[in-house]
Amino acid sequence: MTYNFDFSYLKNGAPAVTLSSFGIAFNKGAIESLGTPDQVIIGYDPDQQAIGVRARGDDTTSPCYDFAPRVKNDWIRIGAKDFMKHLSRTSKIDFLTKAKQFIAEYDEETQTLIVVIDEAHLK
């Protein structure tokens, strides 16, 4: 059996996304899961209470957000105050008064970092 160990995994941490009243913040593990793209697109599935983040492709017409150029102390923050208010209300999880971290999963097939906003995915 052959293994392909990532020896920086423990240091970088599991991909995690922090939601707060200011917006969405990505840790180093989440940033690297996406391949550290220059820009991302962000989607929302209200039925599944999930956020999806993808590297911006050349063929997209969706609004995009600067990503890699915004790295500061191994984190990237994207402002989204109004969306955070809506998401906190619909998910019934209060991350407006105290930020909450969620474990994210990267889907190789769709090349999407998925953040499910529920108690089970809270860090």
Image: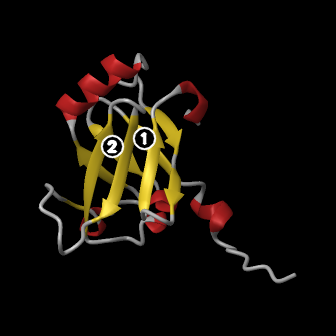
Residue 26, x across and y down, in percent: 40, 52
Q: Which quadrant of the rendered structure holds the N terminus?
A: bottom right
Residue 14 occupies quadrant: bottom right
Location of residue 76 with respect to 21 vertically, above or below: below
Task: Residue at 30%, 40% (x, y): give it.
Answer: 44
Task: Residue at 33%, 19% (x, y): give it.
Answer: 90
Q: Which quadrant of the rendered structure holds the C terminus?
A: top right
> Horizontally, is 21 left or right of 60 in the view?
right
Task: Residue at 45%, 49% (x, y): give it.
Answer: 114
Extreme residue in the bottom direction? 2
Kind of residue at disc 2: Ile
Look at the numbered disc 2 and give the secondary structure of its residue: strand
- From the image, tell me which residue sits under label 1: 18
> Horizontally, is 37 left or right of 109 in the view?
left
> Horizontally, is 48 left or right of 66 in the view?
right
Residues marked 1 and 2 touching at CB (< 8 Å): yes
Query: Toward the viewer: 82 or 112?
Result: 112
- From the image, tell me which residue sits under label 2: 24
